[in-house]
Amino acid sequence: MRFVRSIPVPSTHGEVNVSVGYTRTNFANTTFKADNDWDMLRYRGTDDEEIMRLWTTTSIYVARSTLLFSYLGSMLALIALASFGVLLHVRDRNSSAAGLIFQVRR
């Protein structure tokens, strides 16, 4: 996603994922004119304090809210799909059981 940056950490052979904003602060614009987001994070660090110094507070909150609602929407869709599958399974099971009862009573 646009608001998530993965910063490689060579010492641990891993990476750190951080969420950032979409509007840079005046400090970031003057200090890191030609640098991209990854370079800024490598120079300043990935702490929330540094992220707040590099991107505006509003843009960070909007970005993190967007990520949260995207996650919740995905989970809601998966739960709805699973519930629909269970509903179809129960309906098929009940209809076959009703057919057996009908045959036994005849």
Image (cartoon, helix red, strand yellow):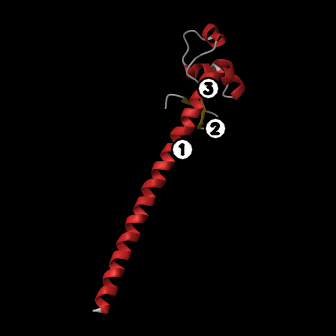
Q: Residues within 10 Å of mark 2 (few under 14, many from 20)?
A: few
Residue at mark 2: 12
The one nearer the camera, 95 or 62, is 95
Viewport quadrant of the C terminus:
bottom left
* Residue at the image position 41 percent from the left and 59 percent from the top: 84
Q: Are marks 1 and 2 in contact (CB under 8 Å)?
A: no
Outermost residue toward the top in this view:
30
- Report whether residue 52 is seen: yes
* Foreground disc of the pair 3, 2: 3
**What kind of residue is marked 1?**
Leu
Residue at mark 1: 72
**What kind of residue is marked 3?**
Ile
**What kind of residue is marked 2?**
Thr
Please, what secondary structure does the residue beneath circle 1 have?
helix
Q: Which quadrant of the view contains residue 55?
A: top right
Q: Are marks 1 and 3 in contact (CB under 8 Å)?
A: no
Q: How many marks?
A: 3
